[in-house]
Amino acid sequence: MNLGTVAHAARRRAGLTQAEVARRVGVQLEVYGRIERGEVFPSVPTLRRICVALEIGSDELLGLELSQPSGLRRLVDAARGLRQPQLRLLHRLARSLHAEPRD
């Protein structure tokens, strides 16, 4: 998938209009529409603002994420937006699940 396709899908998942994303990113609606259609590639600062507006990582937006099993993707999606203490707890839980069984 190209950047425009990923941005479009992420925007739809977030329930945002192109106008809302364009406003958050600080570009004209027409410019954002051209980005989603794959007609232009945004500058690096604009790319970063798109990631923030759509709440996705730059690797995902650029199509660089490795394919993840659906269970892992669900876990990552669920972890987004957790506060730092919750993330630490989740990390400890995951580490404990990998611990060697004790005899």
Image: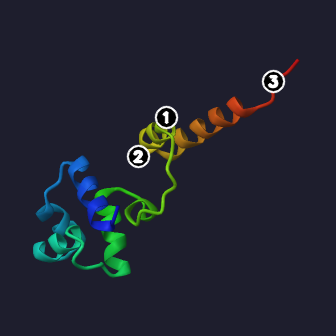
Q: Quick check: marks 2 and 1 in contact, CB under 8 Å? A: no
Q: Residue at x 17, y 69 (%)?
A: 22
- The quarter holding residue 36 reads bottom left
Q: Is residue 54 found left or right of 73 in the rendered image? A: left
Residue linked to disc 1: 71
Residue linked to disc 3: 101
Q: In the rendered structure, find residue 82 and report the number of the disc placed on it.
A: none
Q: Residue at x 11, y 72 (%)?
A: 29
Q: Residue at x 42, y 59 (%)?
A: 60
Q: Is residue 15 found left or right of 3 in the rendered image? A: left
Instruction: Provide residue 2's location: percent of width, then percent of height.
Output: 33, 66
* Residue type at numbered disc 2: Gly
At mark 3, the secondary structure is loop
* Residue type at numbered disc 1: Gly
At mark 1, the secondary structure is helix
Q: Is residue 58 found left or right of 37 in the rendered image? A: right
Instruction: Provide residue 94's location: percent of width, then percent of height.
Output: 63, 35
Badge 1 local density, few (<14 within 10 Å), some, or many (20+)? Answer: few
- Of mark 3 and mark 1, the one earlier in the sequence is 1
Q: Quadrant of the C terminus?
A: top right
**Between tags 2 and 1, which lies in front?**
1
Instruction: Provide residue 23's location: percent of width, then percent of height.
Output: 16, 68
Q: Is residue 76 found left or right of 17 in the rendered image? A: right
